[in-house]
Image (spheres, helix red, strand yellow):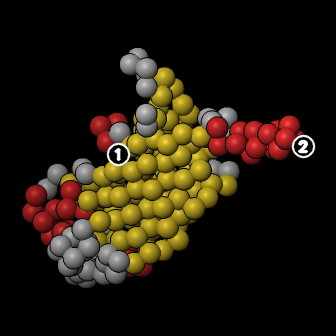
Amino acid sequence: MKLIKLGLISILAGGTLFAGTYNVDPDHSHIGFKVKHMMISNVNGKFDTFSGTFEYDEKTKTFKSLNGTVEVKSINTENAKRDEHLRTSDFFAAAEYPKMTFVLEKVEGDTAYGKLTMRGVSKDVALEFENNGMVKDPWGNTRVGVALSGKINRIDYGIKYNEILEAGGVAVGETVKITIELEGILAK
């Protein structure tokens, strides 16, 4: 009987035996976005300060969890005046809502489902998911890469600022394309 119990414990523990927690390496990761400007071009931006962790199961090559936080004030479109405006209540309201978060709920095939919270509003999102695999770096660290991309509507998060253009259309598009490229290092 003891042998059977020991066997069951081994089987149950085996499912998590190969899972590890990874810390996002901000030097090799990117959180970016793109939005239409005056209906004819795109403004590209990124966030310079972010952190996160995820759990990756080496045996099944699957992601068990992913939690990320972005410092809103770190927005960077390479235009200081625009970045200051984006931090105001017209857009991100960075003083009132200093962080954005993403929590992965599940991955099915090439789609990741999770909850994105911005300006105090949480919405379910579905993002394209790419598991970029695992590698040992030259310094003996285990690294895992993942990419997420998709579209959200900024209005859903209370970012409603806009200007109507004289020739028709609006100054800022409602659809925001997001790209998240993460490289994590196995926590020791």
Residue 157 placed where, x, y %? 38, 77
Horizontal side, residue 89 vs residue 118: left or right: left
Helix, strand or loop at label 2? It is: loop
Which quarter shows the C terminus? top left
Q: Is residue 173 above or below residue 188?
A: below
Residue 159: mark in rendering: none
Q: Would you name the residue on which mark 1 appears? A: 30
Q: Give above or below for 135 relative to 181.
A: above
Q: Is residue 140 above or below residue 113?
A: above
* Closest to the observer, 138 or 29: 138
Residue 39 in picture, x, y percent from top left: 32, 68
Which residue is found at the position 49% from the left and 53% from the top? 66
Front position in the image: 96 or 130: 96
- Can residue 11 be seen here? The reply is no
The type of residue carrying mark 2 is Met
Residue drawn where x is 43% and y is 48% of the image: 53
Q: Which disc is residue 1 wearing?
A: 2
